[in-house]
Amino acid sequence: MQHKFTTVSVIGLGYIGLPTAAMFASRKINVIGVDVNQRAVEIINDGKIHIVEPELDMLVHAAVTEGYLRATTAPEPAEAFLIAVPTPFQGDHAPDLSYVRAAAESVAKVLKRGDIVILESTSPVGTTEMMTQWLAAARPELRFPSPDSDGTDIDVHVAYCPERVLPGRVVIELVDNDRIIGGITEQCAKRAADIYRVFVQGELLFTNARTAEMAKLTENAFRDVNIAFANELSLISDKLGIDVRELIGLANHHPRVNILQPGCGVGGHCIAVDPWFIVDKTPDEARLIRTAREVNDGKPAWVVGKIAAAVDACRAQDGKSGSVKVAVLGLAFKPDIDDLRESPALHIAADVARMSGVQLMVVEPNVDALPGMLSEQALVTLEQALAEADVVAVLVKHRQFVQAGAQLAAHPRMVDAVGVGASRHA
């Protein structure tokens, strides 16, 4: 029989946690949101949001106004706890689980018999089992599951249920996408499924926690490998004097070939990070996955080299003696969003800003101000960039740039890393 939950706590109110909290609250579930950021807590309790995501502002406002969502800085008793905190890497791409551990140990203080703890953060294989050990160490009087538990001697259930949503479509995809439900035990998975049935309309896919963890990493590693193939083709084609986009277009006419388009690297908090978790656990076996990461991580430097060559050519061929004006088009990690996390375009722009004798102009139609590393640079319109820049580098395929493809292709010195020009490509 399906268990009815009345109070859910979401730990971490960022790009995943806040939409998830709002989704439960929209279904008339009492939600306690927890975040260490006091300012974020205050903003949410005012019925507003501190991140950019379509439709989320209306959901949060309604949830807070109707009394179903409340934010705080410390966990309070609930029936289900969903942990959605960051899992970055440190040093030589080793995963940093300190946020998960801190969240688990804070939740442990308010756990009681019958509760369930669900980890949503993208994590290395074995993290959910490790989290269970942290919980058990903090609350030795409660019985926690192990993979060999029979399910009858458990006080607190534990599961891993990763998100698989696209920024800009989170509200829609949280509901529509299939969801992986990975329990430490089969009973844990069933209890977790009761939670997600509150709002998920997609299929609930049952497995164990380790497989669920690997599934999320596999999805992003698969995408990373395919992007790396396209990016490596662009390097090869450039060396051989071949138009890579024409090449890919021809190859994709094969009925079983579907090559992606190359770009200036890979960004965002998922694809650029998650494959390293696989490499960290299995360094000798994950050879292809490691190489794909290295190819994609190396692409921004290649683009910077192309921009530097265009600057040198401008000086040599045009007799430019003063500063060369370089306009970079796009900073976001993907088209038509404002998210700059792990963005290769952002790092390319920063490298260009450090070039001697270069004056940088930035075009990013999705932001109102430049981030700290570029705060001293000029944020300009596309029209101004086209009129004044000696070199134009297209780094993100924003719709505004695609629409201006013919104008961009006509610029005498254009580095096109994403294929918006009519005939000229990086």
Image (cartoon, rainbow, N blue to C red):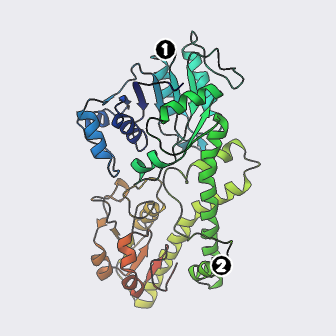
For label 1, the residue is 112
Real-space CA distance between mark 2 and mark 1, rounded to the nearest whole angstrom: 59 Å
**In the displayed structure, would residue 70 be above or below residue 382?**
above
**Residue 139 falls in image quadrant:** top right
The amino acid type found where label 2 is placed reads Ala
Where does residue 281 sit, x and y in percent of width and height?
69, 41
286 shown above or below 191: below
Q: Which residue in the protein does label 2 denote?
A: 251
State the image quarter where residue 373 is shown: bottom left
**Residue 358 in view in this figure:** no
Q: Residue at the far top: name it.
A: 141
Q: What kind of residue is marked 1?
A: Lys
x and y percentages locating residue 308 in the rendered image: 48, 75
Q: Is residue 366 left or right of residue 210?
A: left
Residue at 46%, 85% (x, y): give it. 422
Q: Which mark is residue 417?
A: none
Callout 2: SS:
helix
How busy is the neighbourhood of tag 2: few (under 14 within 10 Å), some, or many (20 plus)? some
Q: Residue at x 76, y 49 (%)?
A: 285
In the rendered structure, the answer to whether residue 113 lies left or right of residue 9 reads right
